[in-house]
Every structure is written in structure tokens, then in C-alpha cells.
Image (tube, rainbow, N blue to C red):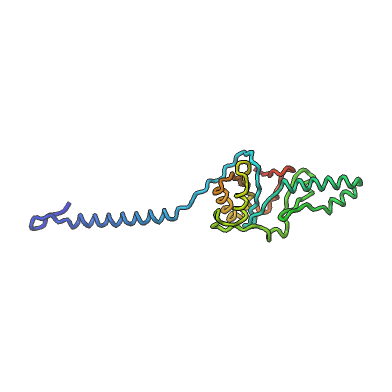
Amino acid sequence: MGKKDATGAINLDSFLDVLTCLQGILMLVIIATGIDAAQTKVLIPTPIERQSTKQPIYLECRDNLLFPLEPAELGRQARIQMMNISQQNTDQIQMMQALSTLRVTNDYYEVDLSYYMLGQLVLKPRADATARGFELEERSTFATDNYMVRLLNKMDVENQRVVLVVRDNSFQVFKVAQRLTFLGRAELGVEIFDSRELLRFTPQGVLITTM
């Protein structure tokens, strides 16, 4: 409370000083709140592992680039070409020689036929595939023209889902692909692989995980 001076009037200087300090503190709180609000980012939910009946579209995040994986198509090509060789060569030695020169590839991957004959579809990156990988800018949006946006725009989100196969040295491109998939309202699955781990699929093109 204020104190009376010698004339009997109440001196409110101390009370006004308190109000001034409170006003300054409130201004600082308002400024700090405004700064925090301006820096708020959109939170993307972490993908939850669950069973899905949707057809997977596999993409590999490697060397901070995006590579389309087409295991079902490569498996189909390997099956057809190996059947042709077995039908054209009745001699076992000739068949082995023909198989030793066979290569099943696309622009990004090559089938390891030694694993395929054991019932597994193993895809190895082609040595020249890096030059064909797709970059994703960190600030990419649906207005950006890049491979991921074009894929999401044309995919059937009711029947297809995106599965990101993420190498442990490529989380930067993964975060961009994850955000774009979330904005595209597509179902997302994520599998983390060591940078040297083989990509194994069933002959039908379903990813085999160690989890």
C-alpha cells in the first residue's frame, strides 16, 4: 500500500513501480510466446507397423537419394528368362554356362541369380545407378516437381501404399519423402536397413525383414 507523506496525502510511487515491472514482464511473455508460435513446425506421426492389404510401392532411400524398387517386375523377368534357358538347353553344362552370362536388370538394380535359385529375390544396386537417383529438396511441397510428388499424384491411395526402405545413412531424404507421403494422404510403411544389408524379397516381390 502507499504511504502517507508529511501533508497526509497517499504516496503511490511504490505501487506504480510494481505495476510498471509487471507490465514489462507481461510484454516479455507475449513476445516470447509469439516467437515460439512462429517457429512451430507441422508434426508428422511416426509410422506404426501394421498389417496392410494394400499393394506396396517400394522406394529405397540410399546415399540421400531416392531409388524406385520394382521387385515384382524384376522377379517376373528373372523367372521368365530362367525358364527360357532351361527349355532351350537340355544339357546341364550348357544350361549352367547360359545362366552364368544371364543378367536381369533395370535402370537401378540387378537380380542376384545365385540367391534366386535358392528361392530368394535379392536386388543389388547397379554400379551406375547413383547417377539416376532422385534428389528431394528439403523444402519440397506438392507444388514442387520431383519424382516423389509425381508418384503420389498418380498412385491409387485406396489400394496402394508407400514403403520406404531406409538406409541408415539417408535419413535426410527419408524425412522429405515421409512428409510428402503424409501430405499426399497415402499409407506409409518404413523399414530401416544397414547401409550394407542385402535387400531380400520373396519371388513374388514382398520385402523380407529381419524384425
Residue 193 is left or right of residue 82, and the answer is left
Give the x, y percent position of residue 197.
68, 51
Outermost residue on the left side: it is 7
The residue depicted at 62 percent of the width and 49 percent of the height is: 154
Kindly give the residue lying farthest to the right in the view shown: 91
Can the viewer see residue 179? yes
Residue at position x 42%, y 55% from top?
A: 38
Kindly tell me whether residue 192 is visible in this rendering. no
Q: Nearer the viewer, residue 82 or 152?
A: 152
Q: Where, by quadrant of the figure, is residue 147 drawn?
A: bottom right
Q: Position of residue 115 (x, y in %)?
A: 77, 47
Percent from the top left, x then y, of residue 143?
Answer: 55, 55
Question: What residue is rendered at 77% in x and 48% in y?
Answer: 77
Measuring from the top left, give residue 117's x and y in whole percent. 80, 45
- The mark tally for this picture is 0
Q: Quadrant of the C terminus?
A: top right
Left-right relation of 144 to 196 = left
Please tell me whether residue 16 is drawn above or below residue 44 in the rendered image: below
